[in-house]
Image (cartoon, rainbow, N blue to C red):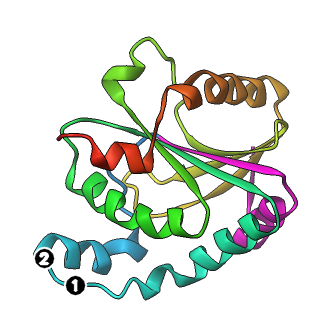
Amino acid sequence: MERIAYDEFLSVFRSSKRAWHLELRDTYNVESEDEPFARFLSGESDSYDWLDEWLRVIREATVNGIAVERLRVVTVPHSDYTRWGLLIASYNVQVGEDIRYLPRDAASGVEFPVEDCWLFDDNRLILSVFSEDGRTGGFARVVDSDLVAEYRLIRDQVWPLAIPYAQYISRPS
């Protein structure tokens, strides 16, 4: 596993045909989200301009034919963070990202790996690595073909089970 910078992550992202993102945590504690998440919790409005750069990346990718997919494995009832993520996801979906949700209880028997990841095409794996407290994160390239195959198998197993965003948010709570 080799740590890589954000620019290198973007380079891999932009050179792929399919970018599949797996998120396994119910709560993230990333410092850059502190203020927007606090606004959400207090019921304040948000311009979401802090999302602009990432939304540009997604829009550029999808316009260039890259399938951008995200699977969120979630616990029901939802954490505050998951509820906030559902709100934010609408912006990602608007720019072409396919976001799906898989309730944890619907994934019983699935042996998920430890780390979140980005699987590019079928052969390039970048882990989303977080500190133990979730405050800091980064990316790590994986060159272990067995681990790449494990994440690919998980993707192929759970992606068809996951519920597309529009359907998921219209379900009764």
Is residue 26 in view from this perspective? no
Is residue 141 in view from this perspective? yes
The residue shown at (28%, 57%) is 81
Q: Is residue 19 magenta?
A: yes
State the quadrant of the N terminus: top right
Residue 103: x %, y % from top left: 34, 31
Of the numbered discs in the image, which one, if any, rests on residue 28? none
The residue shown at (39%, 15%) is 108
The residue shown at (85%, 37%) is 123
Give SS at disc 2: loop
Residue 113: x %, y % from top left: 55, 28
Considering depth in this image, is 41 or 102 the residue closer to the camera?
A: 102
Classed neighbour count for the residue bearing mark 1: other residues with Cα under 10 Å, few (<14), some (14–19), many (≥20) = few
Asked if labels 2 and 1 touch by Cβ distance under 8 angstroms, the answer is: no
Read off the magenta span: 1-23
State the quadrant of the C terminus: top left
Relative placement, left or right, of 9 versus 16 is: left
Relative placement, left or right, of 53 versus 18 is: left
Quarter location, residue 68: bottom right
Relative placement, left or right, of 57 versus 95 is: right
Residue 110: x %, y % from top left: 49, 17
Considering depth in this image, is 23 or 106 the residue closer to the camera?
A: 106
CA–CA distance between discs 1 and 2? Answer: 7 Å
Quarter location, residue 39: bottom left
Instruction: Classify 44 as above or below 120.
Output: below
Give SS at disc 1: loop
Considering depth in this image, is 44 or 165 the residue closer to the camera?
A: 165
Q: Is residue 58 magenta?
A: no
| Residue that label 2 marks | 43
Q: Label 1 is placed on what type of residue?
A: Ser
Relative placement, left or right, of 46 versus 70 is: left
| Residue that label 1 marks | 45
